[in-house]
Amino acid sequence: MELKIWHIAINNQQQGPFGMDELLQKGLTQDTLVWKAGMPSWVKAKDVAELVGTFKPAEPVKPMSYVEAESPKASGNNNFLTAGLILLVIVVIVIAVVFGVYFVQKEKELEQARYRAEQDRREQFTDGRDGKTYRKVKIGSQVWMAENLNYDANGSKCYDNNPENCRKYGRLYNWETAMKACPGGWHLPSDAEWTTLTNYVGGADVAGSKLKAKSGWNDNGNGTDDYGFSALPGGRGYSDGSFIYVESYGYWWSASKNNASIAYYRYMDYYNSLVSRYNINKTHLLSVRCLQD
């Protein structure tokens, strides 16, 4: 029968006595502290001749460069790579979203441009007499030309006899010519029809600021052009061939006459918001805005 004479210290706790086989089962190593009766003190198993060759060899300690340096470094590299991949995926997603929003917006803008172009086409008409195209605009129940008439009729002239002024402001007409100058389906508006227009946009006291174009008037006397009427200051002419007030005043005939030699007209100027109503000799040369029948 095996003698149980050996005591061992595991985790600072004395255990035993054990026989030799039990020591091995307990995982005896060369550094395990052992003691038996007759020994003056506890010693490591490797220092006891009877035990040398019986204990399990201690597992070799991994080099510090591997345990404390290489493993954390490898782990750190893995973490870095993982974070990098996540960041790359996020960047790709963000770029895709940004470009998606951009292209959707551009497509929307193109569609709006096509729509505006189609609307512009529908809001134009061509004078079959000379092929000139004019913009038109609906204001309330009325449909007006959105620019001055530029039909070269006898009794009409360009301001200062300069064709460039006709392209910009339209032609200037005496009243008799103005009465028959509008193309088919259009007519020179009556005094009452001018009043319908100014009443619709807020009254004669403010109509000028709302009907004048956004540019082209002296001293920044431009309007807001709220309704697309785009009134410009084409000035006026006299029967003697002189002209006056271009870029400062705009004058437009009405079809209503005061008497045999005088007719009513409307005018706007650069320094206030009015649409004013006066009468003048029919021989004067004023602009024409046609109204759809």
Image (cartoon, grey):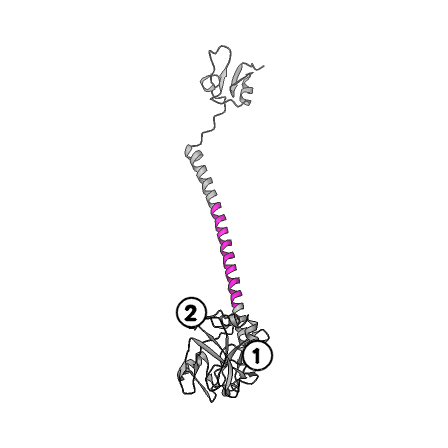
Query: Residue type at mark 2?
Result: Asn
Which labelled disc corresponds to residue 220?
A: 2
Q: Is residue 196 above or below residue 90?
A: below
Q: Which residue range is magenta in the image?
A: 83-111
- Left or right: 162 as drawn, with respect to 89: left
Asked where in the image residue 198 lies, by quadrant, the reply is: bottom right
**Does the magenta run of residues contain 109?**
yes
Percent across and percent down for residue 9 are 51, 18
For disc 1, the marked residue is 192
Dot 2 falls on a residue whose secondary structure is helix
Q: Main secondary structure of the magenta part?
A: helix
Which labelled disc corresponds to residue 25?
A: none
Q: CA distance from mark 2 to mark 1?
A: 30 Å
Percent across and percent down for residue 17 are 55, 15
Closer to us: 202 or 223: 202
N-terminal label among 2 and 1: 1
Closer to us: 142 or 195: 195
Q: How would you rate the neighbour count of disc 1 (Cα within 10 Å): few for under 14, some for 14-19, many for 20 or more?
A: few
